[in-house]
Image (cartoon, grey):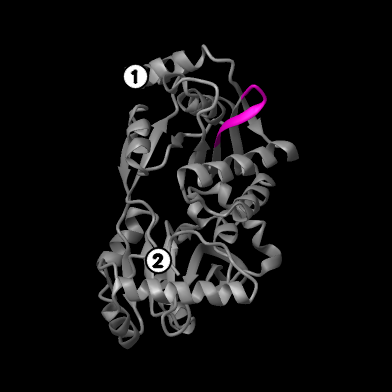
Amino acid sequence: MHWEIIKKAELDSWNEKLKQTNATLFQYPYYLTGEYSSLFYKSTFIKYVEKGKEFAFAAIIEIGIFPFKVGVIDDGPIVLQKNFDLQTMLEDLKKFSRKRFYMHLQIRPSNTEFENLLKNDAGFNNDLFFPYHQKEKSDWNIYNQPEEQLLASFKRQCRRKIVLAGRVPFKFVKLEDAPQLKDVKELFNQVTKIKGHKYISFKAMLQIYKNGKKHSLCDLYGAYLNNELVNAVFIIKDALCFYHFTSAMLVKGYKDNESPPAKLHLFIMQDCFYNEQKEFYNISYGGTHNLVRFKELFNPVEIKKSPYYTYVINKKALSFFQKTTPEGIGRIRNVFRNINKHIGGFYQFGFLL
């Protein structure tokens, strides 16, 4: 058995294959190829095979350049077959990482069995040497249940917000056609300009959306008032859940206490649970203080995720990297960004470099 890079021509098919597994969206090609696609950020997809049979899959985010190139696996690898040696698979993953000349490989495991292997492997430790890329430490999940029970599970203030929003003639819709996508772009641009919020570039968002939409893995939802989009939510999916990826809202023509987001999220949950029969709605962990307070109104269940485990390959490069101050890293990041601007540009995501 060995790990091999998946050819670009067959990559899109993995969006369907992974829907037959418990893989999280952080392993899906439609998402990673949209968000990580530049000179210094890219996604590489590999499969563990023997005689044409596929035993495992992993999506690796590669960040930086040699000798400081880092490989990151979020919620992987994904095991596709039963009854094969996971320890050997891990050893072969180490070999693959060395051949890719990573400074180190950073893994957030996808299940308890694989995490136990990492815990007991002398080559891995749970020090986070590279904190500039890390997904949230928890998920905030709202689970599928009959609608009456779902509403009852929300805090009283949340239910009140839903009722008050119902007094305003908002139109809640799934956004799909070209004029609606143009409205989404305009709304995000306005929120960026007025509130100073930073988002993933719309070009990257659109690429994720178009790639995912082909496989029913992305949707945009919105609230219109007087034919103007005032609230939009971008949802990305895997086989089990909807995930609140990002959203934007402007208060126009209504009072604060009649704002649409609580009712819009309920509208999305109705689609998630009763049309697509997903197991849960991940409203996403964290955010600004006000956003966190808003999400808490839905009484989400906090699911703590596994920590990252690190396999160090180039100790000299890591030692030098660790001596670099955060300010120095910031300067390096700006240099990389300027280089990219001169050679064609890339998306700025707010993670690193």
- Where is residue 203 drawn, in percent x and y? 63, 55
Residue 66 or residue 3, whichever sits in front: 66
Judge whether residue 187 is colored magenta: no
In the rendered view, tell whether residue 111 sits above or below residue 43: above
- Where is residue 249 drawn, in percent x and y? 51, 34
Residue 262 shows which numbered tag?
none
Q: Name the kind of residue labelled 1 in the image.
A: Gln
Q: Residue furthest front?
A: 194
Within 10 Å of the Cα at label 2, are there few (<14), some (14-19), or many (20+) other Cα atoms? some
Q: Is residue 240 visible?
A: no
Residue at the spot x=55%, y=77% of the render? 339
Residue 198 or residue 215, whichever sits in front: 198
Within 10 Å of the Cα at label 1, are there few (<14), some (14-19), or many (20+) other Cα atoms? few
Q: What element carries label 1?
A: helix
Q: Name the kind of residue labelled 2 in the image.
A: Leu
Task: Give the residue number, with chain letter if any, for mark 2.
Answer: 86
Judge whether residue 227 is colored magenta: yes
Q: What element carries label 2?
A: helix
Residue at the spot x=50%, y=75% of the render? 336
- Where is residue 110 drawn, in percent x and y? 40, 55
Along the horizontal axis of the image, is 270 left or right of 171? Answer: left
Asked if the residues shown at circle 1 and circle 2 are in contact, with their CB atoms under 8 angstroms apart, the answer is no
Q: Please tell me how many numbered marks the rendered image carries.
A: 2
Task: Give the residue number, with chain letter if any, for mark 1.
Answer: 157
Q: Can residue 342 be seen in this view?
A: yes
Upstream in the sequence, badge 1 or badge 2?
2
Residue 331 or residue 170, whichever sits in front: 331
Residue at the spot x=61%, y=31% of the render? 229
In the rendered view, tell whether residue 320 sits above or below residue 135: below
Q: Give the range drawn in magenta.
A: 225-232
Q: Is the magenta stretch mostly helix, strand or loop?
A: strand
